[in-house]
Image (spheres, grey):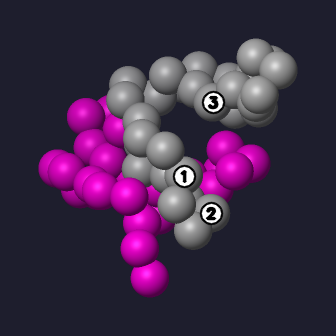
Amino acid sequence: MGYINLKGAFIISPKFEASNGFNEGLAPVKTGGLWGYTNNSGQMVIKPQFGLAYSFFE
């Protein structure tokens, strides 16, 4: 999975097993069987280490 803008162009190329929407600038993404968080540039800001992750809040 990846992320597209409103015009349908990829802003983060498909590289995740699963993902959810952005909240407070971060989105939960699954890679290597674990969940972490990416920013809107596609950089992992919280490395994948969780069995489950929800939208970031506070």
* CB under 8 Å between discs 2 and 1: yes
Q: Residue furthest left?
A: 51
Q: Position of residue 34 (x, y in %)?
A: 27, 43
Over which residues does the magenta segment extend?
30-58
User: Mark 2 highlights which residue?
Assistant: 25
Which residue is drawn at the image coordinates 69% and 32% (left, top)?
A: 12
* CB under 8 Å between discs 1 and 3: yes
User: Mark 3 highlights which residue?
Assistant: 3
* CB under 8 Å between discs 2 and 3: no
Instruction: Name the image quarter holding the C terminus.
Output: bottom left
Q: Where is residue 16 in the image (x, y as percent from the top left)?
A: 46, 28
Q: Badge 3: how crowded within 10 Å, few (<14), some, or many (20+)?
A: some
Q: Between 49 and 17, which is closer to the camera in this rendering? A: 17
Left or right of 26 in this view: 11: right
User: Mark 1 highlights which residue?
Assistant: 22
Q: Where is residue 3 in the image (x, y as percent from the top left)?
A: 63, 30
Q: Between 40 and 5, which is closer to the camera in this rendering? A: 5
Alpha carbon distance from label 2 to label 1: 6 Å
In this picture, is 40 found above or below 57? above
The quarter of the picture where residue 2 lies is: top right
Left or right of 47 in this view: 40: right
Q: Badge 1: how crowded within 10 Å, few (<14), some, or many (20+)?
A: some
